[in-house]
């Protein structure tokens, strides 16, 4: 059984640019959540997608947007990158909204 | 507002000892409390989780104790091993079927555990 996979593993961008991060959910999982983990902190919830629809959003500005595809894979898009966006971005999938969330190893985003 | 407070920030335990990490929450609507283990360069891995209908859950060397009235829960690692050295996160979520905030995990700030031989 393949777990949650994220790409790319590392990314370097400059301020003002845009970035797209990708996540393949675990087989059979229909729910994907995205989290931002700053260095030395716990993950912070960005948003969740359930069966291709947004199902909740954390305290992040609209320049953070997402998408879930029919195969339940997902994208996180961030526009107008800021220095504070430097973090590990984690994707988690679950078999349903009530089921445990399983995380990928994340994408390390560095903003110069 | 930090909804889940975790302590201690760091912990050093002798091999074979008991590691204890504590968390307190504020939102009484929380009804799912997982613990995650994270190694450097890796994503968090689900260790064990509990719902408020039980006061304790044990899986191998890992035990969650839950005190609903005090709004506290803790992770006990028995017979701690050097391979347990990692950062541990408690988290909480609520399982409402509608409305904002359903199912999202709110994490503590983490505890860095070092188990020395």
Image (cartoon, rainbow, N blue to C red):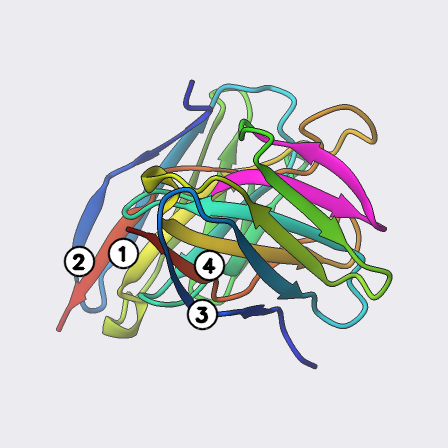
* SS of the residue under disc 4: loop
Would residue B35 be visible to someone looking at this image? yes
Crowd around label 2: few <14 · some 14–19 · many ≥20 (10 Å): some
Seen at 35% across and 51% down, the residue is: A14
Q: Mark 1 points at which residue?
A: B18
Q: Mark 3 points at which residue?
A: A9
Mark whose residue sits in front, 4 or 2: 4
Q: Name the residue under label 2.
A: B13
Crowd around label 1: few <14 · some 14–19 · many ≥20 (10 Å): some
Of residues A106 and B38, the one drawn nearer to the viewer in this rendering: A106
> Would you say B112 lies left or right of A82 here?
left
Query: Dots 3 and 1: beta carbons under 8 Å?
Result: no
Image coordinates of residue A27 in percent, x first then y, are: 76, 72
Q: How far apart are marks 3 and 1 (CA)?
A: 35 Å
Image coordinates of residue B13 in percent, x first then y, are: 17, 58
What main secondary structure does the magenta stretch of the protein show? Answer: strand
Of residues A79 and B76, the one drawn nearer to the viewer in this rendering: A79
Q: Which of marks 4 and 2 is nearer the N terminus?
A: 2
């Amino acid at each position: 059984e393949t777990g949650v996979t994220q790409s790319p593993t590392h990314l370097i961008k400059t301020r003002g640019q845009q970035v797209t991060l990708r996540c393949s959910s675990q087989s059979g999982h229909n729910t994907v959540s995205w989290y931002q983990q700053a260095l030395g902190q716990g993950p912070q919830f960005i948003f969740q997608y359930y069966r291709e629809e947004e199902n909740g959003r954390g305290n992040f500005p609209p320049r953070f947007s997402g998408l879930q595809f029919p195969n339940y894979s997902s994208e996180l898009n961030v526009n107008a990158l800021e220095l504070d966006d430097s973090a590990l971005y984690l994707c988690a999938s679950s078999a349903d909204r009530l089921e445990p969330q399983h995380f990928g190893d994340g994408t390390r985003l560095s903003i110069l | 507002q930090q909804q889940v407070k975790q302590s201690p920030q760091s912990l050093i335990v002798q091999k074979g000892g008991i590691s204890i990490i504590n968390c307190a929450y504020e939102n009484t609507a929380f009804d799912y409390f997982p613990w995650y283990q994270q190694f450097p360069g890796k994503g968090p891995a689900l260790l064990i989780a509990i719902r408020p209908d039980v006061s304790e859950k044990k899986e191998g060397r890992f035990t969650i104790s839950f005190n609903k009235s005090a709004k506290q829960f803790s992770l006990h690692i028995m017979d701690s091993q050097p391979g347990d050295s990692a950062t541990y996160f408690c988290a909480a979520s609520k399982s409402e079927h509608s409305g904002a905030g359903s199912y999202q995990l709110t994490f503590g700030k983490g505890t860095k555990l070092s188990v020395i031989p």
